[in-house]
Image: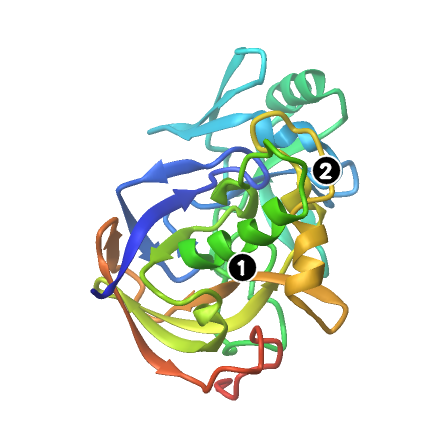
Amino acid sequence: MPATLTAIHRYPVKSFRGESLETAEVEAQGLAGDRRWMLVDASGTTVTAREVNRLVLVRPEITTTGLRITAPGGQVLDVEAPDPTEQVPVSVFSSSFTAAPAGPAADAWLSRELGVDVRLVLLDDPQRRPTSPGYGRTGDRVSLADGYPLLLATEESLAALNDEVLAAAPTGREPLPMARFRPNVVVRGVAPWAEDDWRVLRIGEAIFRAVKGCARCVLTTIDPDTAVREKEPVASLARLRRWDGKTWFGVNLVPDTPGATIRVGDEVEVLEAVEPGEGPLRKPVATAH
């Protein structure tokens, strides 16, 4: 049986809860509507669930006029897409660019609900932000994801990781859900960790380049349903998947066919791969031009 796309996830606001989709349009910078909004502090630096764990409990919904945000307590805020002619400087890690501010009303509401001073901004033009330097091609672009347009994970790799997690855990522990890893696309029907070796793949009608494995951080240790932090999965990944002082799960993708549509149930075909044994993709692929 061929490998299959089993889930599509979009995250309208960086670090907020995700949405499960049946179909999605693939744009150059990622899935349409994925991580176009984010919170920043007074200096313009991105604020994520790494610092404010409660962000994973906030539910966003893209609307025809902008964004609807539902706080953990059920309070709702509707935000109109801001005027793109007004821009403020912002940054995501080492990447600096500009974004459109949503305005003081949205900022005050979110700051009150989250208990920390934040501002909401929209990346109205994703062409403004290149992917993380050193990987991929000169013209590659990304929205507000950490470094690359899409993240892929496989069900088999999660199952292998959960075998390790459960073996080291007290009886009664539940397996980790895929939501811990916040992938955009989930694949079933391959060997565990096969994605380490992929370099070009097709999902339905869309072609992607694999550009870098995903080094995992403390965000994966936050329960997406409670916002409580624990030691897993990083503790188990450190035993199973440690290279170069980091722990790895999933692979970052760059689309090569913007405008294509992917659908749950699509066939996944690996078009180019390397021999197994090197672990996750950690060095730049010689494709820059």
Residue 27 screen position, x and y as percent: 36, 57
Q: Nearer the viewer, residue 117 or 169?
A: 169
Residue 51 screen position, x and y as percent: 75, 38
Q: Quadrant of the N terminus?
A: bottom left
Residue 32 higher or lower than 62, as above or below:
below
Residue 261 screen position, x and y as percent: 24, 55
Q: Identify residue type, mark 1.
A: Arg
Q: Nearer the viewer, residue 182 or 242?
A: 242
To which residue does mark 1 refer? 128
Mark 1, Cα crowd under 10 Å, few <14 / some 14-19 / many 20+, is some
To which residue does mark 2 refer? 230
Residue 70 higher or lower than 42, as above or below:
above
Mark 2, Cα crowd under 10 Å, few <14 / some 14-19 / many 20+, is few
Q: CA distance from mark 2 to mark 1?
A: 36 Å
* Residue at (64, 17) in percent of width and height: 109
Q: Identify residue type, mark 2.
A: Glu
The secondary element bearing badge 2 is classed as loop
The secondary element bearing badge 1 is classed as helix
